[in-house]
Amino acid sequence: MNEYRKVIARSLLLAGIIASLAGVVVFVLLLYLKHHEQVKEHTVLVDLWRNYLYAYYFAVGNWNNIQDQFEAGMIGADAVHIVSFNLIDITGHQIFNYDLPSVDQTFKALHEPILVQGKIVGYFDLAWTSQSVYGAALWVSLLVICIVFLLAFSLLYRYAKRSWIQQQQLTYVLGKLQEPETEFDPTSIHTIHNEVLRSRLTEVGNHIHKLETVRRRMVADISHELRTPISVMRLVIEGALETNTAISIEQACSILEELYRMSKLVQDLQQLSLSETGNLALRKSWISIDSLIEATVDSLLPGVEDTQTMTFHNLSKNVSVYVDPDRVQQVLINLLGNAIRHSRGIIEVRHSQEGANFVVEIEDNGVGIEEEELPYIFERFYRSSNTDRHSGFRGMGLGLAITRGIVYAHKGTISVESQWNVGTIFRITIPVFKE
């Protein structure tokens, strides 16, 4: 409620400032216009009296009986109020004087010459009053201030209230985003009218929820992967201690195998972290990509089932590339290993050179990857829903993420195409030479 009062107070303050500025501008403008009008009035009135006095002297030849004609000659009296008139001859003698007390604003024309046939025949002083502009300008300015204040406050209040409501809604949504244990509901922001903001908040909410899901799954998977080897080693060691017997060769081999599994997990996590932060070290050298692919394929052939066939198509002969051979071989092993596990019979490896890049494609005729899973297939700890169902292999979801990190470290690209129940193609493009 205090924030709402602040909204009203800010609206009143801004409206008051705007209205005051508008009033000052109007007041100054009216004063300027009135001053311009008074200057014009001064010139016209003095010229009228000079012409009148000229006509009188020209007709009579002297200033006799001028006082009798004065009131009849009150030129401009309908527009202004004459409060003083003084007629002086050329010797400085006062011929006629007329004065009225006045407290209003007085304008004067002093010692104005009267010319008749090119000769000065006298001088006159004239003073008159005009309606003060300050009062009228002040009232008009106050009226403008009131109108502008009401309009400005109305508009500012509506805008400020809408912004305040949006802020409250945004605060509520951000509060919901801070509750990762609760699945983000996009309908919670339906009252936010900004389409771009609503869309971005939806994306952020879904991304946070996905990250939280991945984090929980990662913790669970790592705990599971570590619990099994630790349990095996603990049972073996506890059994040896309880029976006071030495650990057998078979038991030592079992412990060593579990240690290898733990080391592999830690190494994968470290490698993934380095690749994601751009700190993955590469030991590049010039190698024959043909020989590297053939050696990798040969090393994996023992894992190929009798019902599976792996073929290698070398479309570019004798291509040398400047890469880290160990890292690139790890990429090939990861992709070929996935192809072997998921293939239903045919695995094809194609290598070619396209301009300044070499391209490797690995294709299998497995069940494929569902279309909605393709955007996430390279994310860490992501496992396809078809992995356990069709291959029986359960991994950590690190292989493809590490593969992408290695390819990116070589300034290359990796993509995947897949059709359900047809197969999958992974395509790697890496520059032949890149420092």
Image: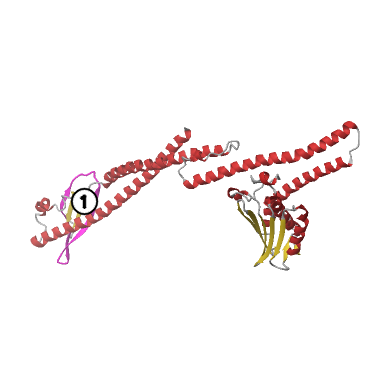
The residue lying at 14 percent from left, 61 percent from top is 54
Pick whichever, 315 or 279, lies toward us. Answer: 315
Q: Main secondary structure of the magenta part?
A: strand
Q: Given the image, on which type of amino acid does mark 1 rest?
A: Ala
Q: Is residue 98 magenta?
A: yes
Quarter of image, res 412: bottom right
Where 285 falls versus 372 (above or below)? below
Give the magenta part as a residue range. 94-122
Pick whichever, 86 or 25, lies toward us. Answer: 25
Q: Position of residue 383 (x, y in %)?
A: 66, 46
Q: Position of residue 76 (x, y in %)?
A: 16, 52
Q: Within 10 Å of the Cα at label 1, are there few (<14), some (14-19), or many (20+) other Cα atoms? A: many
Q: Viewed as shown, does residue 370 lie left or right of 115?
A: right
Which residue occupies the extreme top position in the image? 242
Which residue occupies the extreme front position in the image? 307
Q: Quadrant of the C terminus?
A: bottom right
The residue lying at 76 percent from left, 47 percent from top is 264
Which residue in the protein does label 1 denote? 127
Q: Viewed as shown, does residue 318 lie left or right of 116?
A: right
Pick whichever, 366 or 189, lies toward us. Answer: 366
Q: Position of residue 37 (x, y in %)?
A: 25, 54
Q: Is residue 212 magenta?
A: no
Number of numbered discs visible in the structure rendering: 1
Determine whether the residue tagged by mark 1 lies in a helix, strand or loop: strand
Q: Position of residue 170 (x, y in %)?
A: 51, 40
Decide if residue 399 is in sight here. yes
Tell me, what colour scheme is on the image? secondary structure
Where 207 falls versus 359 (above or below)? above
